[in-house]
Image: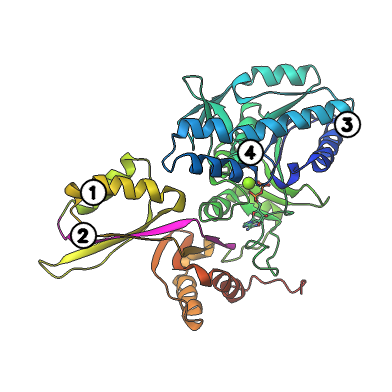
Amino acid sequence: MARIVMKFGGTSMAGIERIRHVAGLVRREVEAGNDVAVVVSAMAGETDRLIQFCREAASLYDPREYDVVVASGEQVTSGLLAITLQGMGLNARSYMGWQLPIRASGHASALIDDIEAEVLERVFAEGGIAVIPGFQGIAADGSLATLGRGGSDTSAVALAAAVNADRCDIYTDVDGVYTTDPRIVPKARKLPIVTYEEMLELAGVGAKVLQTRSVALAMRHRIRLQVLSSFEDRPGTLIVGEDQIEDYGMERQVITGIAHDKNEARVTLTGISDRPGAAAAIFGALAGAGVNYDMIVQSVAKAGEKTEITFTVPASALERCSDVLGKSRPEIGYGELIADTDICKVSIVGVGIRSNPDIAARMFATLAERRIDILAIATSEIKVSVLIPEDYTELAVRVLHTAYGLDTEEQE
Ligand code: ADP
Ligand code: ASP
Ligand code: MG
């Protein structure tokens, strides 16, 4: 007997027929004698629809009220799955974030502080199935808090840690983690196994198959995490520690995968006087407003001349970023703020980057061959990211995938 957290994403929960199919997968685990807690997402498209309502209501909406609106999608699917399981004669019940409780701090992209296991332990002891809406928790003041886009993955991993689960199975609409998004590159290859570190980087640069925070949490608690399909019964991708990978006899590729992120915006501040403290004023203001920034480029100025600073922020934070920098303009002292959302960040990830400078050079050469302009570059130990014009995204991902020998020959 094992203790399992099963998480089902939006496509898996989109409509009663699919929920019935999900219930069948849950029943299979229960009938195998396992303790099961199920975490569900809202139906596909529902969270986008709810966010759009918030935007229409006010462009700079209150994050606390946003949470009240967007958390509702998961409430619907958790109730529907519990009803469906009950209809199959199973002892299932839904538990909202506040009922466990799942305590969280902040709004709109709240962090989970802790989860009490008591209620779930009781459910397991009574042979029941707990169905929990993903993406939500409760803030200290009792208000609803949501965990950021894709946050149901983090709910599932956090619950797995809280109840000491043997496995956390993330069921989605692809049958595992691929070398790149298989919807963009049909020749992408499924990875049978990937390390927490690599998955963390891949998710961090846009491979939305897992929310980045869920991977960080799984790594910290050494949760046995698995990504698999709700629709096809076949092995998925196992995410394990670097120390475990040899146990699986895997040969390491220099590049594990390629990811892209179109949800970035490029911001340029012109006419900045080149003095100590300019960057501190800009990024201090952004940090104070909770705006994440990335890929900073500063042009070199001749003595006495003005300089420019360019950086990226999530497109969803652009409005807030412009607002904050507008208010801090007197302290920062800049000419113009130019924003561009027609850009994309493309990244290669792999442990081979650590020890081999040729890998990054090959990326730049491959893009140059296709005349793809690089607007900014950022590197870390096992990742290289470039900012390119958005129209070239698919081409860039495809040519890089081929250049690093990641294409599979099986398809096409
Ligand atoms: P869910 O609703 O189940 O949480 P998501 O849409 O959040 O599903 O994540 C699954 C999607 O992630 C896939 O449909 C796929 O298009 C995308 N994706 C991006 N990069 C990858 C990758 N490297 N491997 C697998 N899927 C990926
Ligand atoms: N429904 C939320 C979203 O679309 C959370 C999730 O599905 O993980 O972002
Ligand atoms: Mg997701």
Which quadrant, please, contains the N terminus? top right
- The amino acid sitting under disc 2 is Gly
- The amino acid sitting under disc 4 is Ile
Residue in the picture at 39% in, 69% down: 375
What coloring was used for the rendering? rainbow
Q: CA gap, disc 1 to disc 3? A: 58 Å
Q: Are marks 4 and 2 in contact (CB under 8 Å)?
A: no
- The amino acid sitting under disc 3 is Glu
Task: Identify the residue position indicated by label 3 in the image.
Answer: 31
Give neighbour class at mark 2: few <14, some 14-19, many 20+ (Cα, 10 Å). Answer: some
Between discs 1 and 3, the one toward the N terminus: 3
Task: Identify the residue position indicated by label 1 in the image.
Answer: 280
Task: Identify the residue position indicated by label 4 in the image.
Answer: 223
Disc 2 within 8 angstroms of ligand 2 (CB)? no
Between discs 1 and 2, the one toward the N terminus: 1
Looking at the magenta stretch, what is its main secondary structure? strand
Tell whether position 263 is magenta. Answer: yes
Q: Nearer the viewer, mark 4 or mark 1?
A: 1
